[in-house]
Amino acid sequence: GCGSSGSEGGGGGGGDDAIVMGFSQVGAESGWRTANTKSVQSAAEKSKITLRFSDAQQKQENQIKAIRSFVQQKVDIIAFSPVVESGWDTVLKEAQNAKIPVILTDRAVDSKDTTLYKTFLGSDFVEEGKKAGQWLVEEYKDAKDTVNIVELQGTTGSAPANDRKAGFAEVIGADPKFKIVASQTGDFTRAKGKEVMEAFLKSTPDIDVLYAHNDDMGLGAIEAIEGAGKVPGKDIKIITVDAVKDGMQALADGKINFIVECSPLLGPQLMDLAQKVLKGENIPARVVTEETTFDQEQAKAALPTREY
Ligand code: GYE
């Protein structure tokens, strides 16, 4: 059951000694998120950690409520993936006062007080944005004309949206021929990606490139592009982030041109970190996920053994 943190051993003894983790998930907005939830749930089971799972439906207020209820339940440890970066200090302070350690997973917070959480496990989103930009720079290295880019941003205020935008802008900013002609949020969902791309296609003539902050928005945009009688991957080149199965399939089919990988398989590392924290072991303040990139040929090769 639950008890004060620290006294209960890690190592997944099971029975009464089992660690109880409260986990507040962002939602179920994308294929990435579904794979991440599965990874966390199955890793908890393997480590014999009791998971109290709460889905926030992409709303910060729901996450704050979930964290408060975990504090009330006196769970041993709280892990969460903050939907947006700002506004966490108060609730994190409450967990700290209750002596319940917190681990950030997948997304970061912008709190100045870094003692409010033990570590942050997840990708380097700025680096992902840079990789997207680097592919584009290489792809258009011989082009003289302006390259008109539209951007589908992730959830407003989220770490991956902020950072993927910044990393990309930094790299393409070195050459004035690259112009972001429209940029809007598609909330990381397929439906919103389609809707916003339809609006872009109406308002913006001559789109050369779409940069979508995740596969799902890119996949929605593909429907919009085909609906407008254009050929995705040819008339409009498409770069996305994540590399989930549906994205990789579209890449192998030539509808997407390049995907920057972002791994959702954070479960095993999260459980390992939680056990170490509760044993009082030192852990690094930041754990960065290892990731690669895929072009169309690489997607064809990787698809048969892709886990998610
Ligand atoms: O890229 C997107 C999801 O936070 C890294 O959230 C995650 C992002 C992921 O909705 O598909």
Image (cartoon, rainbow, N blue to C red):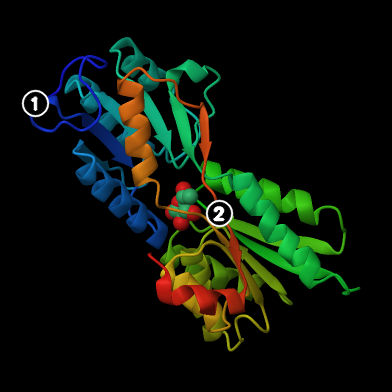
Under tag 2, what secondary structure?
A: loop
On the rendered image, what quadrant is the C terminus found in? bottom left
Instruction: Relative to 246, say whether 254 is above or below.
Output: below
- Residue 155 location in percent, x, y? 49, 49
Could you say which quadrant of the image residue 82 lies in?
top left
Q: Is residue 33 left or right of residue 146?
A: left
Relative to the observer, which residue lies in front, 267 or 113?
A: 267
What residue did someone put label 2 on?
Answer: 291
Q: Residue at x 30, y 13 (%)?
A: 99
- Residue 256 location in percent, x, y? 58, 75
Q: Residue at x 40, y 39 (%)?
A: 81
What residue did someone put label 1 on?
Answer: 16
Q: How many marks?
A: 2
Relative to the observer, which residue lies in front, 302 or 216?
A: 302
Three-letter residue code for mark 2: Glu
Could you say which quadrant of the image residue 232 lies in?
bottom right
Three-letter residue code for mark 1: Asp
Q: Residue at x 66, y 78 (%)?
A: 236
Q: Is residue 60 left or right of residue 179?
A: left
Under tag 1, what secondary structure?
A: helix
Q: CA distance from mark 1 to mark 2?
A: 38 Å
Q: Residue furthest right?
A: 144
| Mark 1 Cα-neighbour bin, 10 Å: few <14, some 14–19, many ≥20 | few
Ligand 1 lies under 8 Å from the Cβ of mark 2: no
